[in-house]
Image: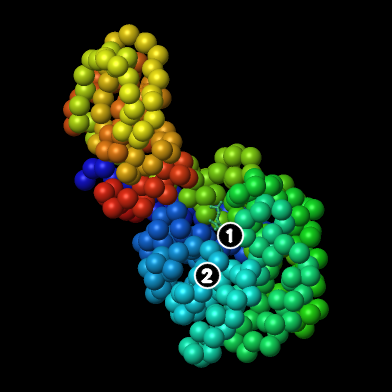
Amino acid sequence: MNPRVNIYLNKLQHNTEVLVRECNAVDMNVAAVTKVFCGKAEIAEAIIAGGVKYLADSRIENLYKLKDLPLEKILLRLPMISRAKETVELADISLNSELETIEALNKAAVELEKIHKIILMMDLGDLREGIFDNEELKKVLLVIKEMKNIKITGIGTNLTCYGGVIPDNENLGKLLETAKVIETEMGYPMEIISGGNSSSFHLIEKKGIPVGVNHLRLGESIVLGYETAYGERIPNTYDDVFQLVAEVIEIKEKPSMPIGTIGRDAFGKVPTFEDKGKQKRAILAIGKQDIGTHEVLPLDKEIEILGGSSDHLIIDLTHCQKDYRVGDEVTFNLTYGSLLALMTSEYVYKNYIK
Ligand SMILES: *Cc1c(COP(=O)(O)O)cnc(C)c1O
């Protein structure tokens, strides 16, 4: 069925095993981040087989799908107060930075007769989520101490997301110092010191992760085989676990320049063109509704992507060796953005391959 995403579950398990082995070798546990594939349980199972300790997702809807899988679940995005009860029901652990929210979680946990574990998020300079100064931290701790159904199970940070700040010994060192402050105040040890996402993996490869950081939340590095601080391939991993297959619905020789007065395109932008003479152009049945404006990478290197609209991707086949016909399939490797969009699109068939 086209268009489809082929999902090679064995390759995914392999990538997971490679990353888990490297992390375990330096006493780190891995939480696999499932949001890029919308928390689909079939895919999460391959990751569990790869040996991760936790599953983590940003969306409550995805935690529903993961509900029956045996590992502890982490809610990655700061919880919404309006959904505190679902958070406690579906997540064993949630990431938090706001006292009002933690109070709502405590209330829900009392009602549900559960202990809810939280990881306090610290902002070490990337300026997305996290408590920013130590005064606020101390105030928050004093209040949490009185909560019967909340346990601070750890501390965490998120880097290279908004600000592009790269994890290093200095910022992660600060995380460890803050963990000591919390331990002293609360009187119990932090079980999880979560040193970030796939952008922290480069420190593991260089054996440069500060001792004591014992947890990473890995998404992109598992599914695409890239570390994300410098965009390097991780050795011995697959970058083609997920591939897009789209079908040719038109092939014609056409000029490279549109004919007539140029106004706006389907998305309100005024397009510009370079005259490259006549081209052999094809239209694929996949569009911005499925891939957004993100990049897809044709396996046939002689294909050039010209553009598209909501429902179409227009490609240039002029320089291809292969003689493409209407009805042929074209295969692409994916980037994080296009994978996220394709998995989210209900118009794209998900083809699980064992
Ligand atoms: C998405 C997310 C991750 C995973 O990031 P990757 O770069 O895909 O490894 C980790 N932590 C949080 C809080 C996230 O939202």
Residue at 37% of width from left, 11% of height from top?
275
Q: Position of residue 47 (x, y in %)?
A: 46, 60
Q: What separation in Å lies between label 2 and label 1 (alpha carbons)?
A: 17 Å
Residue underneath mark 1: 217
Determine the secondary structure under disc 2. Answer: loop
Q: How is the image coloured?
A: rainbow
Q: Is residue 80 left or right of residue 174?
A: left
Q: Secondary structure at mark 1?
A: strand
Q: Amino acid at mark 2?
A: Pro
What's the mark number on residue 296?
Answer: none
Q: Quadrant of ligand 1?
A: bottom right
Residue plotted at (21% across, 19% down): 252
Vertically, is 246 above or below 17?
above
The image quadrant where one finds the C terminus is: bottom left
Question: Looking at the image, which residue is at 66% across and 77% down?
Answer: 152
User: Residue 185's image quarter?
Assistant: bottom right
